[in-house]
Image: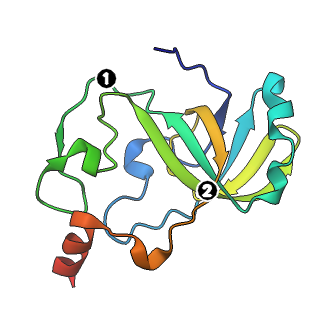
Amino acid sequence: MFTPHPIGFISSPYNTKSDIPKGLGAKHDADGVLKILPEFEPGLTDIEGFSHLIVIWEFDRLNGFELLATPPSDNRPHGVFATRSPRRPNPLGLTTVELRRREGIELHVRGVDMLDGTPILDIKPYLSSIPSEKLRRGWLAEAEARQK
């Protein structure tokens, strides 16, 4: 086992979890800044060439977890691993953001869905070789169809 240590923190417009858009049709287009700790700046070398980044972060304000979750986009419970619920056995969040620009240790991004001050655990460039027509959306596609 390893003990995660933040590589930086999010500067976000969201101060409470109720501020973050949720549910079907939620738009995640808020701007934010990934403020990386100075000792990790060499790790940002060449990141400017990527349009999107995957940010791995910690749900640092939650305690405990539930194995069944009822997401805001459906009225039926689903296994926590089939949802994006924050109440997970390992409180890890994953968000894909658009990299707008880099200013030293600050990455200006669009698409944040985390609270201001959230610890960043890792950043990876977004790369996918899966064509969109091969992606399945599981129960979420069914919930979206019921909303129409």
Q: Position of residue 9 (x, y in %)?
A: 64, 32
Q: How is the image coloured?
A: rainbow
Furthest-bottom residue in this view: 148
Residue 61 shown left or right of residue 138 in the figure = right
Calculate the distance from the C-alpha at mark 2 to the C-alpha at mark 1: 26 Å
Instruction: Mark yes or no: residue 112 visible.
Output: no
| Disc on res. 80 | none
In the image, is residue 76 above or below residue 147?
A: above
Instruction: Mark yes or no: residue 1 visible.
Output: yes
Residue 112 shown left or right of residue 90 in the figure = right
Badge 1: few (under 14), some or many (20 or more) residues near its Cα, within 10 Å? few
Examine the image and state in which quarter residue 105 appears: top right
Count of residue discs: 2
Secondary structure beneath dot 2 equals strand
The amino acid type found where label 1 is placed reads Asn
| Disc on res. 63 | 1
Residue 133 shown left or right of residue 64 in the figure = right
Residue 100 shown left or right of residue 87 in the figure = right
Mark in the foreground, 2 or 1: 2
| Disc on res. 97 | 2
Q: Position of residue 5 (x, y in %)?
A: 60, 19
Work out whether residue 74 or residue 54 is closer to the camera in this orientation and state it. Answer: 54
Q: In the image, what residue occupies the spot 29% across and 51% down?
A: 83
Q: In the image, what residue occupies the spot 51% across and 41% down?
A: 115
**Quadrant in the picture for the N terminus:** top left
